[in-house]
Structures are given as C-alpha cells and as structure tokens.
Image (cartoon, rainbow, N blue to C red):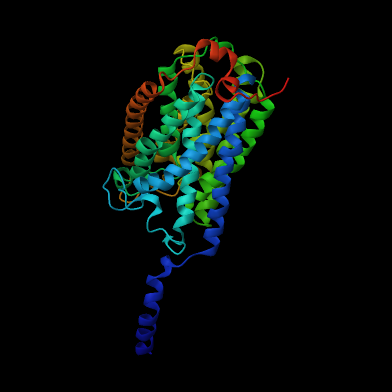
Amino acid sequence: MKLLFIIASLVLLPLTAQAEDVLNGANTAWILTSTALVLFMTLPGLALFYGGLVRSRNVLSILMQCFAIAAIASILWFVVGYSIAFGTTGNDFWGGLDKAMFSGITKDSLVGDIPETLFALFQMTFVIITPALIIGGFAERIKFSAVLLFSAFWIVLVYAPITHWVWGGGWLQKMGLLDFAGGTVVHITCGVGALVGAIMIGPRKHFSRTMPHNLTMTVTGAGMLWVGWFGFNGGSALAANGDAAMAMLVTHISAATGAMTWMIYEWIKFGKPTALGTVTGMVAGLGTITPASGFVGPGGALIIGLLAGIICFNMTIFIKQKLKIDDALDVFPVHGVGGILGTLLVSVFASTQLGLFSGSGFAEGISSIGEQFQVQLIGVSATFAYTAVVSYLLFKLVGLMVGGLRVTPDEEAQGLDIIDHEERGYVL
C-alpha cells in the first residue's frame, strides 16, 4: 500500500507542478469580459461624463481627446509601455525592454493561468483611462497638440514606471504595498498630473461661473463608469473567484455610500441635492475603494464610501474656492484625494481583527495596522512626489515644443470644437 502511494505521488507530482501553467477557461472568460468593461469606462463612459460637464462649444474637443488618448495609449503600451511596466530584465524601478513590441508574447504564453496577450490587453485598458482622466484638470483651454504630446510622454515616463513599482515586481510591491486595482497607479497619478496641469495652465476666464452644458450626458456617462468599474476592480483579481466577487461587492457598496453621502451632505449644506453632486459622490466612492477592493470586507467598504463622500466633497470646495485652482472637472479632489484616502485606509480595514469591519489581512510579512500604514504612506508619498515632478517637467517641455500649452483668449472664447477640429458638437 505504501509503495502504491509513493508511485501515485511521483506520477501526480509533475501535474501538480504544472497546474499554474495550464490555461483556465473560466478565468480567461472573466478577464475577457473585464477588459471590455474597463475600455467601456473610457469609451464612451468617461467621454460622456466629461463631455456633459464642459460648455457646449467644447464638448467635441473632450470627446476627441478621450478617443485620441485611447489610440495613443494603446500603441505606446504595445511598443514600450508594457515592457517598462512588466518586463523582466530591469530592476526595482523599471522592467526593462525585453517585452518591447510584445516580444516573446504568443497565443500560448501565460501569466498565471490566463493568456499573456489577454493580461497585456487588460492592463492596456488601464493605461487608456488614466491619462484620459487627467484632461479634466485643464479642460476647455489647452491645445490639442499639447494634450497628445503630454499624454504620450506621461504614459512612458510616469504611468509605466509606477506600474512596475506597484504591480510589476518593483520596490513598492516588494515592500508590501497593497493596491488592488490602482489607487496609486491610476488615481493618485492622474489626480496629481491634473493638479499640476491646472496650476501651470491657469484658470479659465470666469471659471467660477461655468456650468455643465448637458447633465443628462454626464449622468449617462456616470452610469457607464459604475458598471465598468466592476471589471476594473473585479477583474484585477485576474481570476473568476471569491476575490473577484468580493471586490465587486465592496466596489458597489462604496459607490452607493459615496453617492448618498455626497447627496445628503450637499442637501444639508446648500438646501437641495443635485444630480451632479450625486454622481460625483459615486465616482469618489469608486475611486477610493479601488486600492482596497481586494483586501477589505463590506463593512470596511461602507466606511470608505462614507469618508470618500465627506472628504472629497470638502476638498472639491477647498481646491476651487479657497485655493482658486481651476481643476475644471475635479480630478484631483475626487480621484487624487480618493486614491490617497483609499490607499491609506487599506492599512486599517484589511485587518482581520475588526469584527464586522474586518478584511482579508495584511501583506505578507506585515502583522499590524501601523506597519502596513507605514508602507502605504511611503507608496502614496513616492507616487505623489514622482508624478508631480515629472508631470511639471513634461508640461514645461511640451509647452516649449508647441509654443505654449494654452490657446489664446479669443480661441478659448470661441471654443475648442471649432478652433481645434473645425467641427461642432451641436448644429444649432
């Protein structure tokens, strides 16, 4: 009997060792679906969300910027971005160039138990939405050429390296940073990039009195973002399993709580709840739960959504009314602050010792909230500082290349639809 057990073990051992190298159809199907959902977030979700928030003479320019960034980001990710983020010949700060032009990636190569082609495509949809979010910071007054050049440089020099730090085997991942779906990689980077751009380019003329031209479009886009975020966070599990299901559940709870919190807060403070405030609160809840979505439970998600609604609401007012920074579509106070808040709160609600508010535990080798918080704070600080410095230098460089980042006052008054594209979003 003992001899039979030994023989069976020897026979099954190679199969066990190779289990991770076998394609999993269920996981592959789920990431295929998630990839489509994340692209849906940008096209048309974010494009419509942002498009409705600007004045009618600039709506087409916003849609055009989102589409153009999607194309540029896709090409750059294929040529060099994926390799910088997930290459294997680099170091703790960049991945190297061994996967440039998707070198070595075939239909049979795997990442875990899904095709590497699919993993690269899923990650491509993340790199598409991140610079597209940035354009909200300086909407209605930047040259189209400046948007294209800045986005291209920023993807290669900011997004791809930080992705390597956090998800590609870089120094923050080795330290134990918890970022399930992009609190640092997506939300802090886009928020800081937008803030730097808004400060450097300056405010729109009479920006404090500008109003969204089509809230119906904005609310429609917001609904698409909410649906697409299930792929954004749930897909980041890279498997059709309990982690994906929990990520989707907590994402939904945080979004709902953020929307209600912002709506009620606005109702109390200003006398009436608005559609714009409600959908902004939803986005704040979604952005804040993103880094925590695979590590916290429903109770933690409720608190995260509540804090997102309160803190992001007040930061929006502070940025515009106190600091007089025209972050046109509130990218930094919603995404940047939300990303920072969510990344730090992971250290609390990932704990398994909080009863109804417990999560799934800390990073390997970390045993306390304080220790995890220290790692999260380092990740937030490094991402913020690096993004701010490089974004500043890139805006300076692009400004020199195109003869200034900003359109003239007359062009701004006429609207970017006609100035940049000789087209109108609406025929009156």
Q: Residue at x 47, y 45 (%)?
A: 124
State which quadrant residue 285 falls in: top right
State which quadrant residue 177 falls in: top left
**Residue sitting farthest toward the right:** 428
Residue 356 coordinates in the image, percent (x, y): 51, 44
Residue 50 coordinates in the image, percent (x, y): 58, 28
Residue 60 coordinates in the image, percent (x, y): 61, 27
**Above or below for 130 versus 230:** above
**Above or below for 192 versus 300:** above
Which quarter shows the C terminus? top right
Count the numbered circles shown: 0
Q: Residue at x 51, y 39 (%)?
A: 70
Nearer the observer, 20 or 32: 32
Residue 327 coordinates in the image, percent (x, y): 49, 20
Nearer the observer, 427 or 242: 427
Q: Is residue 43 left or right of residue 5?
A: right
Q: Residue at x 45, y 34 (%)?
A: 187
Question: Could you tell me if residue 336 is visible in this image?
Answer: yes
**Residue sitting farthest toward the left:** 91
Nearer the observer, 393 or 281: 393
Q: Residue at x 58, y 52 (%)?
A: 33
